Image: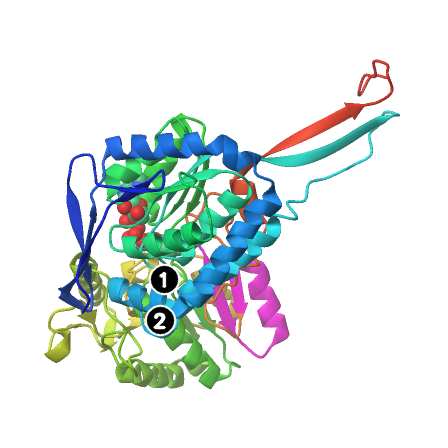
Amino acid sequence: MSAPAVFGNRIGGASVPAASGASFENRNPADARDLIGTFADSGAEDVLRAVAAAKAALPRWRALPAPKRGEILFRTAEILVRRKEEFAAAMTREMGKVLAETRGDVQEAIDMTYYMAGEGRRQFGQTTPSELARKFQMSVRMPVGVAGLVTPWNFPMAIPSWKMMPALILGNTVVIKPAPDTPLSTVNLLLALEEAGLPPGVVNMVTGGPEAGAALVSHPDVGVVSFTGSTATGRKVSEAAARLFKHCHLEMGGKNVVMVMEDADLDLAVDGAVWGGFGTSGQRCTAASRVVLHEAVAREFTERFVARARALRVGNGLEAGIEMGPIINAAQLARVESYVAVGQAEGATLLTGGKRLAGGTQAHGFFHEPTVLGDCTPAMRVSREEIFGPVVSLIRVGSLEEAIEVGNSVEYGLSASIYTRDVNKAFRAMNEMETGIFYVNAPTIGAETHLPFGGAKNTGNGHREACVQALDVFSEWKSIYIDYSGALQRAQID
Ligand code: NAD
């Protein structure tokens, strides 16, 4: 274990301790004896300084031609490629998911950074004919100003990059407040940006918890807020931003569903449900926490799925052969345990798992068994509420129609999937599921950066990240009319 380090906030290119002098610890969830570092525990005063630095950096950054901004992003991506292994290992140590997955997380940041570097030479607007002679018209994107980013811990480099890169390529400057469980991965992303030549003050970071987050999203000089986290926190962020008419983008909770039809390839469906349900220890917004089973295949699927869940190797994600890492922290582990109890009290059958793991090398971490609850009904809390842990609820249905109805019966609308060999069933589900993401013969997880990402219903507020849609969050459209007739021409009148 390497020595713990002391990290300040990043303000105007300098490392600055919290104004109060307070700090908090970041520990390895696989072994809480392993102290990764201490980080500034920021409050409103620190946010004021960071926003002032971002505001001061704005005129020069905005004036830099977008292709030049793109070159800095391109170099950032190359540095991330070079340092991928190092940053992935640091991320596993910080938040627990297995190395293959943290490599994927850094890769997502790489993909997004290359993608947005390319937007430096696109950012397409419109040109369109005028209704009047000798008049030209077009639309262009403008940056909003200072972007306030608040991020969760489960994708600690990917999600900051999804927000930061589109903000930067458009000419915004940034203050980011990462989750207190994963500040190191944001520090590493900033290292790459700074090594690539990002000017001081263009991206600033304040670490800490809700106090810093709340100060950032309600600061009058922050023009656009982009938040990913729970629906409960998202509601507070939305209310704070609304008071000042800020642009506000929210990505929130999920209760995603895999639907296994009577004609499904069961080997494929079991593989998908295991990966979707237990990848990242079930701590993904897109986790397949519900599996809806057609009664014709329910028994066979359940037997195979339970056997696979039971056989998963749980442990420190840095060790070879480990398939599922720890839960992020003690509070989240207690929450997972409480949901297992709630499910059983409601009448669900515990088919495997259900307990924390605390023996041997797991004694100092926050581990929980992969857990499957059978005989669930759609009305149970374990079928409706986001657990955010390795707990999958199995629900039986008699038809495609019923599967779709059950699938749509939750408040969230992030991701859904269907396993079937019948193209008609696949298309009906694709059409009728109320989700922002849909998969056929694949689990609910695995989005790519060049399609829009986000959810319907209480998962989102109508925006999308990734792809060109991300540019909409961080820009204002300006429509420009140039009259070269030399005379007054009146639209709609002449
Ligand atoms: P969280 O809501 O507890 O925290 C998210 C961030 O908000 C953290 O940085 C936190 O410090 C900050 N925060 C807390 N209170 C705040 C306040 N009042 N004002 C401003 N900021 C505040 O979520 P989490 O536990 O870090 O992450 C898990 C949640 O994130 C799950 O619900 C998951 O579904 C969701 N998530 C959604 C997506 C998506 O794209 N839809 C992706 C990943 C995670």
Q: Tell whether 93 sits left or right of 274.
A: left
The answer to which quarter of the image holds residue 19 is top left
Say whether marks 1 and 2 touch (CB < 8 Å): yes
Q: State the SS at label 2.
A: helix
Identify residue for label 2.
279
Residue nearest the observer in this picture, 3 or 481: 3
Q: Which residues are magenta?
A: 413-439
Q: Amino acid at mark 2?
A: Gly
Residue 327, percent from left and from top: 23, 65
Disc sitting over residue 284 in the figure: 1
Residue nearest the observer in this picture, 474 or 66: 66
Relative to 323, residue 91 above or below: above
- Near mark 2 (Cα within 10 A), the count class, few <14, some 14-19 or many ≥20, is many
Count of numbered circles on the image: 2
Q: Tell whether 285 sits left or right of 391.
A: right
Residue 141, percent from left and from top: 62, 37
State yes or no: residue 435 in magenta: yes
Q: Amino acid at mark 1?
A: Arg
The answer to which quarter of the image holds residue 15 is top left
Asked if the beta carbon under badge 2 is closer than 8 A to the nearest atom of ligand 1, the reply is no
